[in-house]
Image (cartoon, helix red, strand yellow):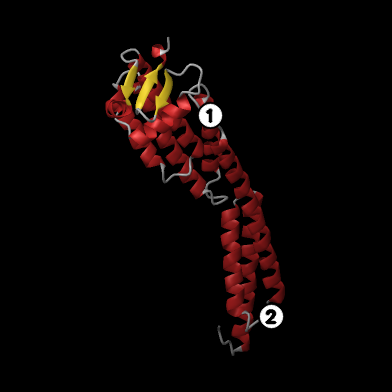
């Protein structure tokens, strides 16, 4: 609060204040025209703060009402713009991805990233920008895993995938989590096919050790896999704790 006693000073301060507010108003409208809503909002908040500082010295009800309405209008528009980008981003995360559509999915994500980068400061899109960049880092690791599936041995690939799955646990990337789990399931299935060429029957404990997978998870996976027509496994006998491969069916 400022106490202004001198009448001349009073008029000078008021005139200067109104000129500042006029400049603020023009600045805000120009920023709205170029859709720099973040800068417009910051300037509107600054104007309201300035008005409130002198509210007890001058009658600034009209100015306060004008900038308050501007502030509300910008806030609504800014939230709507953010919602549009956030909705597009979240919709992409709902897309089911696999090896065949991964490249097309990446193109869509890259297009969104480009738009977000171009409007980063205009609509306060920093969080979406950071998440997309982090997503690309994980996608790079996915490509690395896919490229080494036929090169590295089962254990090395399995370790890479498990580490990847653990790193993903704290991230909100549902389609990526589903995709990497499907890669892991395909790797396990391929390994089981290899065992089916060596064994008719094998104990679950031996198979668990040979595949470097926890027994509980392996049993759960086998029970879901055996229902598939082309599965390498006929059955798992919990009483005998043995896995029966398809070639043993005569």
Q: Secondary structure at mark 2?
A: loop
N-terminal label among 2 and 1: 2
- The image shows residue 162, relative to residue 148, as above or below, that is below
Q: From this viewpoint, which residue is outermost toward the right?
A: 62
Q: Is residue 183 among what the camera can see?
A: no
Q: Quadrant of the C terminus?
A: top left
- Residue to which mark 1 is pinned: 105
Question: Is residue 227 shown to the viewer in this render?
Answer: yes
Task: Name the quadrant containing residue 154.
Answer: top left
Q: How many marks?
A: 2
In the rendered view, would you say 249 is above or below 58? Answer: above
Query: Which of 223/160 is in front?
Result: 223
Identify residue for label 2. 59
Give whichever of 98, 234 is nearer the camera. Answer: 234
Residue farthest front in this picture:
239
Q: CA gap, disc 2 to disc 1?
A: 58 Å
Q: At numbered mark 1, what does the secondary structure look like: helix, strand or loop?
A: helix
Residue 227, x across and y down, in percent? 50, 23
Q: Is residue 140 above or below residue 17?
A: above
- Quadrant location of the N terminus? bottom right
Residue 226 picture location, percent across and down: 46, 23
Residue under the image location 42 percent in, 46 percent down? 170
């Amino acid at each position: 609060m400022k106490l202004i006693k001198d009448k001349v000073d009073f008029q000078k301060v008021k005139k200067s204040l109104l000129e500042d507010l006029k400049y603020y108003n023009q600045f805000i409208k120009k920023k709205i025209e170029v859709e720099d809503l973040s800068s417009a909002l910051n300037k509107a908040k600054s104007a309201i703060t300035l008005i409130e500082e002198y509210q007890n010295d001058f009658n600034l009800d009209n100015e306060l009402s004008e900038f308050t309405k501007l502030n509300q209008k910008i806030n609504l528009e800014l939230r709507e713009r953010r919602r549009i980008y956030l909705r597009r981003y979240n919709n992409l995360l709902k897309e089911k991805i696999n090896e065949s559509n991964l490249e097309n999915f990446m193109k869509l994500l890259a297009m969104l990233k480009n738009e977000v980068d171009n409007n980063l400061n205009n609509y306060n899109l920093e969080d979406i920008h950071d998440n997309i960049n982090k997503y690309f880092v994980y996608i790079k690791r996915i490509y690395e895993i896919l490229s080494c599936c036929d090169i590295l041995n089962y254990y090395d690939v399995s370790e890479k995938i498990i580490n990847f799955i653990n790193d993903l646990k704290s991230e909100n990337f549902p389609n990526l989590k589903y995709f990497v789990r499907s890669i892991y399931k395909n790797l396990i299935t391929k390994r089981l096919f290899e065992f089916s060429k060596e064994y008719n029957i094998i104990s679950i404990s031996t198979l668990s050790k040979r595949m470097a997978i926890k027994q509980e998870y392996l049993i759960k996976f086998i029970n879901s896999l055996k229902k598939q027509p082309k599965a390498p496994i006929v059955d798992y006998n919990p009483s005998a704790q043995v896995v029966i491969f398809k070639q043993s069916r005569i």
